[in-house]
Image (cartoon, grey):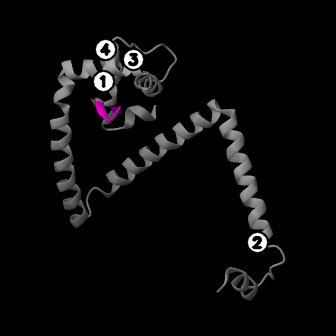
Amino acid sequence: MAFLQIDRVLLLAAGRQAYYGPPGRVEPYFAAAGFPCPPGIPIADHMLQIVSSPDNRDTVLLHGENNLHSSSRRAFEYEYEHDTDRSAGDAKTGGGMVAAVHKSLVGTDVLLWRSAVNLLRSPALLLMHNLVGLAMGVAMGFVFYGVDDSLAGLQNKAGG
């Protein structure tokens, strides 16, 4: 699962920190707050669903204030400062390029997965994406209709 490949999760609810830590500890954290993850539901979807409800959000935020995770803000700030220093050093030496590319690919993987899930869950959104793509294709077809198949024809149409 791509969610578990992320280094740290920062979940905000109503502008406040609901959870910060490794993704492997999200499930026990929400279970301790009284919201165990049902079988078959991805933990990422579950935690977003919990903090989307105002009543549940308040419970999770209260649990975070009473838990050790409330001190994670200091850990987050410390980690951010040191990551900034380390990335500046890596940029000078060229080290860490593979790690940066890997992190970027994992992030892209997670975003693509979330987009696909959202599109599959909402048929209207999928239909709208397709209609907008079709409309843009037709509009571009009209713009370039009758353009000569030469560089001069393309430059004339593009205004160059």
Residue to which mark 2 is pinned = 143
Measure the alpha-carbon separation of dots 4 and 2: 57 Å
- Quadrant of the rendered image containing residue 32: top left
Element carrying mark 3: helix
Question: What secondary structure is marked by label 4?
Answer: loop
Q: CA distance from mark 3 to mark 2?
A: 52 Å
Provide the residue designation for mark 4: 33
CA gap between label 3 and label 4 equals 13 Å
Q: What whole-number distance in Å separates the C-alpha atoms at marks 1 and 3? A: 22 Å
- What amino acid does circle 3 point to? Asp
Q: Are marks 4 and 1 in contact (CB under 8 Å)?
A: no
Main SS of the magenta segment? Answer: strand
Type of amino acid under label 1: Arg
Q: Which residue is mark 1?
A: 25
Q: Position of residue 91 (x, y in %)?
A: 25, 63
Neighbourhood count class around disc 1 (C-alpha, 10 Å): few under 14, some 14–19, many 20 upward: few
Viewer-nearest of discs 4 and 1: 4
